[in-house]
Amino acid sequence: MKIRRAQAADVESIVRMLAADQLGVGRESTTDLAPYLRAFELIEADPNQLLVVADADAEPVGTLQLTIIPGLARGGALRGQIEAVRVRPDHRGAGLGERLVRWAIAEARGRGCALVQLTSDVTRTGAHRFYQRLGFTASHTGFKLALPAELR
Amino acid sequence: MKIRRAQAADVESIVRMLAADQLGVGRESTTDLAPYLRAFELIEADPNQLLVVADADAEPVGTLQLTIIPGLARGGALRGQIEAVRVRPDHRGAGLGERLVRWAIAEARGRGCALVQLTSDVTRTGAHRFYQRLGFTASHTGFKLALPAELR
């Protein structure tokens, strides 16, 4: 199983994985891919973004996004931030999520990051155990504020 | 009090604010600014990073960093991420932190973000009440993994 940079042709598969998630099901729609393809172009154009997929039988069955964030804190450290980790339902339980996250940690290290960070919905207790097993510490509380479209 | 983009000449003041923090005190050092100035150059070179300061008497007394992150999740939404919110100890309790965070929310909205996110150390319970008062929901657990320098 190979982990590689996602291409525009992978966007539909990735969105299907996002939509197959218990929390993503109400947030994503594959009927119109145009907004996702526009977002993909922004990701592609930004050297600090890396969206990857893992293939099985030449089809994406896992994905995550790694963002490199420069900052002054912690001695001017680079941070690697992991978002949108998903494994297709029929490929779960085979260690693919772990392979993806370990890949992202190694990539962040290779890019000089001093820290890897991510947030996980408080209801995903299985995911929390998974990240702690990989060495992550649940040291922070993650806050979100949705900005309604009519106010943007 | 004006909020403006930070310049290289502000880096020392910003690092002093990071170091004056209860958790930052062991993580920052103002004896050698070189790594911070290198990090500042990376921030400056990235159009998705915005490091700002708030001045009082022509001196920075507050700071935060806003990062714009493109992604496929939530319909291809842009996220605004707030990091490193700090107010100089002698200027706390006057609403400056709130002004800075509200400024960042408005800036994120102006750039088309559908969501603003941040994490706060679990021990900063006062900060948690502050963010909830501003409308944020503590919906996530934030995980960190330090990468030791010898392994980078």
Image: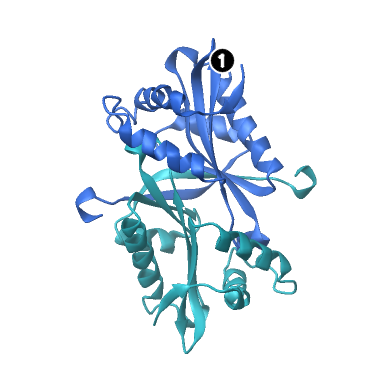
Chain colours: A cyan, B blue
Crowd tier of the residue under label 1, counting other residues whose Cα lies within 10 Å: few below 14, some 14–19, many 20 or above = few
Q: Residue furthest bottom?
A: A57
Quadrant placement of the C terminus of chain A: top right
- Residue depicted at x 41% and y 75%: A3
Identify which residue is drawn at 47% across, 90% down. A57
Identify the image quadrant of residue B26.
Answer: top left
Residue A112 drawn at (x, y percent): 32, 52
Please state the chain letter of the residue tagged with numbered disc 1 in the rendered image. Answer: B
Q: Identity of the amino acid at label 1?
A: Ala
What residue sits 66% from the left and 66% below the top? A36
**Most foreground residue, B88 or A127:** B88
Point out residue A91 in the picture as x, y percentages from the top left corner. Answer: 46, 81
Foreground residue among A143 and B90? B90
Label tally: 1
Vertical position of residue A48 compared to residue B1: above or below: below
Residue B64 in the image: state x and y as whole percent. 51, 32
Quarter the N terminus of chain A occupies = bottom left
Residue B80 visible? The answer is yes
Residue where numbered disc 1 is placed: B94
The residue located at (40%, 58%) in the rendering is A128
**Secondary structure type for disc 1:** loop
Can see residue B121?
Answer: no
Horizontal relation, residue B60 to residue A37: left or right: left
Which residue is outermost to the top?
B57
